[in-house]
Amino acid sequence: MLRGNCRHLTQIPGRFTLLWLVLLLSLCAAVEASSAAPEFVELRETTLLSFRNYVAGVEKRNNDSLRNSRFLWIDELPERARNEAYAKLKRGDVVLRRLTSNTGGKTNEIPGGMIHDWEGMVFIPGATLEQVLAVLQDYDHHSSYYAPDVERAKIESRDNDHFRVFMRFRRRKVVTAVFNTEQDILYFQDSAVRAHSRSTATRIREVADADTKNEREKATNEDSGFLWQMETWWRMEQRDGGVYVQNEAVTLTRDIPTGLGWLIEPFVTSIPKETLEFTLGTTRKAVLAQGKR
């Protein structure tokens, strides 16, 4: 009944109180948000090529830092910023930064899409490197550790430090999107106190009508473009009476079309940061919980 009539709510008679007006506006917004659907958008070859070129640069930066023993990114900060970052980590906070290929701290925009590059870190006091790796590699239970973001997870194959994993993600920001993904993950033991991993989402499919009898994976030319590509780099270092855990996640999403910014922009600009912050914070909690058993 309210759909399409929001503009008339400003003409509500004076006998309605301000509270009623707020409630009606909220209801109207919810109805319209639930009925709105992002337009379909197809990943273009030029967009994918631009993303792959960006990832190649990230790969080189990460490999160079590993060879030069610059293991944690906060150690490259100026002294004052570095001390502040370590203080936050010791308080249990997640420290984040956004990386770009340009200046101004803006999200990387490429033809037909947007690249989101976030890096973060947590400190897990009293933990060992083995305990952190045990949680990260326990993919069959990631739906418990990382709920509600991870709905399902299962190791499909393992060859020593090489994992192939199925994961289903649920993302919600104005609209809800569900994705089936397949991850290819490699772990590397750098020393007795250091390790890192590299993962690629080899397959991502948005799910329509999730958890219903009509559930199906959308074709690549009919998805919403909320998650096209995902690359991840983890690092772990045991020192200072615990383990520092670092994660960089680079994702590719659609760009923001004219007229649908209110619906799409919160999802594609906020979700990458919030997801990384949640993942790191939850990893910290999961390792601490395992240590108490």
Image (spheres, rainbow, N blue to C red):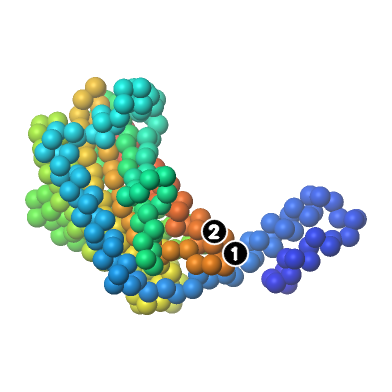
Q: Amino acid at mark 1?
A: Ala
Q: Nearer the viewer, residue 98 or 241?
A: 98
Locate residue 12, reporting x and y percent.
84, 61
Mark found first going from the N terminus, 1 or 2: 1
Q: Amino acid at mark 2?
A: Val
Say which residue label 1 marks. 33
- Give the quarter of the figure containing the N terminus: bottom right
Locate residue 141, reporting x and y percent.
29, 50
Question: Disc 1, disc 2: CB below 8 Å?
Answer: yes
Q: Is residue 68 left or right of residue 183?
A: left
Locate residue 63, reporting x and y percent.
15, 45
Residue drawn at x 54%, y 58% as measured from the top left: 174
Residue drawn at x 29%, y 58% as measured from the top left: 230
Q: Is residue 159 left or right of residue 176?
A: left
Say above or below: 47 vs 128.
below
Say which residue label 2 marks. 174
Q: Secondary structure at mark 2?
A: loop
Q: Secondary structure at mark 1?
A: helix
Cα distance between the residues tagged 1 and 2 = 7 Å
Quadrant housing residue 269: bottom left
Q: Is residue 278 left or right of residue 46?
A: right
Mark 2 neighbour class, 10 Å CA radius: few under 14, some 14 to 19, many 20 or more = some
Locate residue 39, reporting x and y percent.
49, 73
Quadrant housing residue 134: top left
Say above or below: 218 vs 139.
below
- Give the quarter of the figure containing the C terminus: top left
Residue drawn at x 85%, y 51% as measured from the top left: 17
Residue drawn at x 74%, y 59% as measured from the top left: 24
**Whether residue 91 can be seen here:** yes
